[in-house]
Image (cartoon, rainbow, N blue to C red):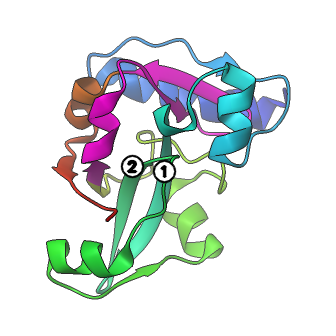
Amino acid sequence: MSDQTSARTAAVEQALADAGYVAKARTLPESSHTAAQAAAALDCEVGAIASSLVFLAGDEPVLVMTSGAHRVDTELLSQELGVPVAMARAKLVKEVTGQPIGGVSPVGHPAPLRTVVDESLRAYDVLWAAAGTPSSVFPISFEELVRVTGGIPMRVAG
């Protein structure tokens, strides 16, 4: 693990600790840019992967924590948020999170992001979220994910 990767993961662990949640990130043997890759490495259901996606809701970046088992329905998300929604470009994702796509954590960003947490993640006792890199993850419950992110539980897929 490079120094930059270690620093990103340490920053996520610190952000979690600052929010009152202690978690030790786990390094996966290979980079896991997709939910399916992460689930295979963790030997868990793909739905238990809490994928971090950044969208533009109007002009505001919004972090959507969604289940790896489905895709975000942007029309539904637009209705729920009351503004047009589009997937953010990679450059904006890196800018607002400080983390690479495939490794975006729910916390540890340069500034807090408005966050939506997919209601379907409630179905899993343990969720796995990226810890700032494509090869690091940490376990968390739905309730703790909502709490540490200040997220709004919402249906994001049909």
Q: Image height check: is 108 above or below 154?
A: above
Q: Name the residue tied to disc 1.
A: 52
Is residue 128 on the magenta stretch? Answer: yes
Q: Residues within 10 Å of mark 2 (few under 14, many from 20)?
A: many
Element type at mark 1: strand
Q: Image height check: is 72 above or below 89?
A: above
Tell me how far mark 1 sits from mark 2, CA to CA: 5 Å
Q: Residue at x 75, y 37 (%)?
A: 4
Q: Residue at x 84, y 23 (%)?
A: 29
Q: Residues within 10 Å of mark 1 (few under 14, many from 20)?
A: many
Q: Position of residue 25 (x, y in %)?
A: 59, 18
Label count reads 2
- Please indicate, yes or no, whether residue 86 appears anywhere in the rendered image: yes
Magenta segment boundaries in residue numbering: 116-140
Q: Name the residue tied to disc 2.
A: 65
Q: Is residue 135 left or right of residue 35?
A: right
Three-letter residue code for mark 1: Ser
Q: Position of residue 117 (x, y in %)?
A: 28, 48
Three-letter residue code for mark 2: Met
- Please indicate, yes or no, whether residue 134 appears anywhere in the rendered image: no
Disc assigned to residue 68 = none
Is residue 94 on the magenta stretch? Answer: no
Q: Position of residue 85 (x, y in %)?
A: 34, 82
Query: Looking at the image, which is closer to me, 49 or 2?
Result: 49
